[in-house]
Amino acid sequence: MANRDTYKYELRKGNKVVYVGITNDLDRREAEHRNEGMKFTSMTKVGNVTTRSGAEAWEADRIATYKENHNGNRPQYNLNDSGK
């Protein structure tokens, strides 16, 4: 059975989602994003910790849903549709 060790999260600037991602360490990942120069006001954990494969599927689906609602555009800092 796969470990449930992966968090799903969104970075926001105000109410706007600027990044959708997954990680096994929220604090480390937030620091990495800030060091990369991403501008955001909050990091929000989404749902419960899950398996890596489940989180990857959620990430791709969340980006697709975002695109459907934003004229085909991804969140500002997501560079591709899969999140990888």
Image: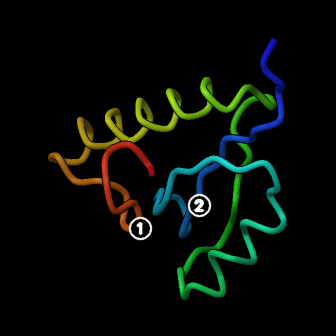
Q: Residue furthest top?
A: 1
Please give left or right for residue 7 compared with residue 84 in the image. right
Q: Of tags 1 and 2, which is closer to the observer?
A: 1
Residue shown at the point (65%, 82%) measured from the top left: 34
Q: Position of residue 16 (x, y in %)?
A: 46, 60
Residue type beneath disc 2: Leu
Lower position in the chain sequence, tag 1 or tag 2? 2
Find out whether the residues at labels 1 and 2 contact each other: C-beta distance under 8 Å: yes
Q: Residue visible at 64% across and 73% down? A: 41
Q: Where's the N terminus, which quadrant?
A: top right
Residue extending farthest front = 1
Q: CA distance from mark 1 to mark 2?
A: 9 Å
**In the image: residue 7, left or right of residue 82:** right
**Residue 51 drawn at (x, y percent):** 72, 26
Q: Is residue 12 left or right of residue 62?
A: right
Nearest the viewer among 70 and 3 is 3
Q: Residue at x 36, y 66 (%)?
A: 76
State the residue lying farthest toward the left.
71
Q: Which residue is mark 1?
A: 77
**Residue under the image location 54 percent in, 88 percent down:** 37
Q: Left or right: 33 with respect to 71?
A: right
Q: Position of residue 58 (x, y in %)?
A: 53, 29
Mark 2 Cα-neighbour bin, 10 Å: few <14, some 14–19, many ≥20: many
